[in-house]
Image (tube, rainbow, N blue to C red):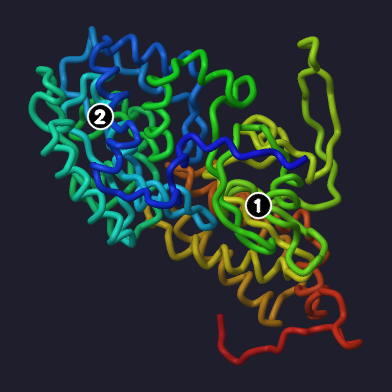
């Protein structure tokens, strides 16, 4: 029996008759949770978020309550800022834009509660530059909320003031990294900061304590206030609580975005029961489970994980790709990550050299250029993959490609180094035969078509 969606964040998204204006939002109970929160003490809300076990939905999966707890209100003498990271740029990810475009007031309510809980009076939504309409929708929603006294001076009849502003980015992927985002928000080139000492909770925006949370993460705050942290923690699985919006693209019959309790279904159930199976009845070849920067998982591989039995004891378990539960911890145990929730499915007709080359082009273009290993290495990997893809590979290219990736990961200021290196490391190791065939001039190893093996046609341009 197919597992039913648990629509918490996306409950009203795509619902007939549901619109983005504040009257519709109020009709469906909007801003009631903010009013409830305003009757509570800020530290009590922070405590509820900690009890909920909510983990960040932007990529790292870090504890939201713990992040908030890094700011000690008793010792802090500076203003505290909140930034909503709406710079959704990870290839394969398109969940946050659904919230922004279709339910903006839910985000604003979640932000207002988060601000109140952490004594924040000024907050920003840093939105991806390409989301032009999304920025306009948010601006209008903010104006509506201020007109109804849910934002601005003395919100909901209290003495608490909070302002939220929309700041549009300029289309740079690196601004999804929290300190690069902060630099950009300050009007500077978005070079990520070194941590330590520049942890946002200590030295963030304007060198003041700053909380940076993802769109989906902040939307969850209103639901935690509504149901309580303990009830929220019952959703999902231990240490992987709540629901998660998943974006599925690639070779499935019904791609789209869905919302399930974290860990409630496996990769195989998502592909076959929710998305209608592999397109055209073909065979599954690989899955990228958390946006393009996550390490690829190969069909047919076996993964060793630790599983909790009904009696609470832990057992070692070996599972296949389609049996992997979609939660933070299990995906990490397989060597990949849940990341941004962008799940890319690839069938047997996909050439892994071409797929990786496409990914490498993106990361070479998006490197901010601050760190030498990333600035030079991402471009080298792009060039090596380009010549492999176009029939001009060298016998030592496979080893060289892996060596370059190994010398980027863990050697840069921010996680962009890992983002561009991990796909290369995993693709080359797991599909080594395809890369070696290209390097030796034997072309693609895809199944023969009409009795002929497709071979890349050499091109004349130099790389």
In the rendering, at what x and y percent does residue 404 appear? 61, 57
Residue lying farthest to the bottom in this orientation = 460
Local crowd at mark 2 within 10 Å, few (<14), some, or many (≥20)? Answer: many
Image vertical order of residue 304 relative to residue 35, above or below: below
Give the SS element for disc 1: strand
Q: Quadrant of the C terminus?
A: bottom right
In the rendering, at what x and y percent does residue 231 appear? 52, 16
Image vertical order of residue 461 relative to residue 204, above or below: below
In the rendering, at what x and y percent does residue 192 appear? 35, 44
Local crowd at mark 1 within 10 Å, few (<14), some, or many (≥20)? Answer: many
Give the SS element for disc 2: helix
Residue occupying image coordinates x 51% and y 13%: 230
Which residue is identified by label 2? 112
Which residue is identified by label 1? 288
- Quadrant assignment, res 161: top left
Q: Earlier in the sequence, mark 2 or mark 1?
A: 2
Q: CA distance from mark 2 to mark 1?
A: 34 Å
**Viewer-nearest residue: 329 or 255:** 255
**Viewer-nearest residue: 87 or 460:** 87
- Quadrant assignment, res 320: top right
Image vertical order of residue 419 relative to residue 326, above or below: below
Residue occupying image coordinates x 9% and y 24%: 154
Q: Quadrant of the N terminus?
A: top right
Is 29 on the left or on the right of 281, as rendered?
A: left
In the rendering, at what x and y percent does residue 143 appear? 14, 44
Mark 2 and mark 1 residues within 8 Å of each other at the beta carbon = no
Residue occupying image coordinates x 34% and y 9%: 44
Residue 396, can we see it? no
Q: Mark 2 vs mark 1: give the one in front.
A: 2
């Amino acid at each position: 029996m197919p597992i039913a969606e648990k629509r918490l964040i996306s409950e009203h998204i795509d619902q007939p008759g549901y619109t983005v204006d504040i009257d519709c939002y109020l009709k469906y109970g909007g801003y009631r949770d903010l009013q409830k929160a305003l009757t509570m003490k800020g530290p009590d809300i922070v405590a509820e978020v900690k009890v909920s076990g909510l983990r960040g939905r932007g990529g790292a999966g870090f504890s939201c309550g713990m992040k908030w707890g890094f700011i000690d209100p008793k010792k802090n003498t500076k203003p505290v800022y909140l930034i909503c990271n709406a710079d959704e740029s990870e290839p394969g990810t398109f969940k946050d834009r659904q919230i922004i475009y279709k339910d903006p007031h839910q985000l604003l309510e979640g932000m207002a509660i988060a601000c109140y809980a952490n004594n924040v009076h000024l907050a920003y939504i840093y939105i991806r530059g390409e989301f032009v309409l999304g920025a306009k929708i948010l601006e209008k929603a903010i104006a509506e909320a201020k007109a109804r006294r849910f934002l601005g001076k003395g919100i909901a009849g209290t003495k608490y003031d909070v302002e939220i502003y929309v700041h549009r980015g300029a289309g740079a992927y690196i601004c999804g990294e929290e300190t690069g985002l902060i630099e950009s928000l300050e009007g500077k080139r978005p070079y990520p900061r070194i941590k330590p000492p520049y942890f946002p909770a200590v030295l963030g925006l304007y060198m003041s304590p700053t909380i940076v949370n993802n769109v989906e993460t902040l939307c969850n705050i209103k639901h935690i206030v509504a149901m309580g942290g303990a009830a929220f923690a019952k959703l999902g699985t231990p240490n992987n609580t709540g629901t998660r919006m998943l974006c599925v693209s690639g070779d499935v019959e019904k791609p789209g975005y869905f919302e399930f309790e974290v860990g409630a279904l496996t990769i195989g159930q998502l592909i076959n029961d929710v998305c209608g199976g592999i397109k055209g009845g073909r065979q599954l070849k690989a899955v990228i489970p958390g946006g393009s920067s996550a390490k690829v998982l190969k069909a047919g591989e076996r993964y060793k994980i630790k599983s909790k039995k009904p009696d609470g004891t832990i057992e070692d378990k070996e599972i296949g790709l389609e049996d992997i539960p979609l939660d933070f911890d299990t995906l990490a145990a397989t060597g990949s990550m849940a990341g941004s929730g962008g799940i890319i499915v690839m069938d047997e007709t996909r050439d892994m050299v071409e797929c990786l080359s496409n990914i490498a082009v993106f990361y070479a273009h998006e490197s901010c250029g601050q760190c030498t290993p990333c600035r030079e290495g991402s471009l080298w990997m792009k060039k090596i993959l380009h010549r492999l893809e176009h029939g001009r590979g060298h016998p030592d290219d496979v080893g060289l490609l892996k060596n370059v990736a190994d010398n980027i990961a863990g050697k840069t200021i921010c996680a962009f180094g890992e983002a561009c290196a991990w796909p290369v490391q995993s693709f080359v190791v797991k599909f080594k035969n395809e890369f070696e065939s290209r390097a030796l001039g034997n072309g693609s190893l895809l199944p023969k078509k009409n009795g002929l093996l497709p071979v890349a046609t050499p091109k004349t341009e130099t790389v």
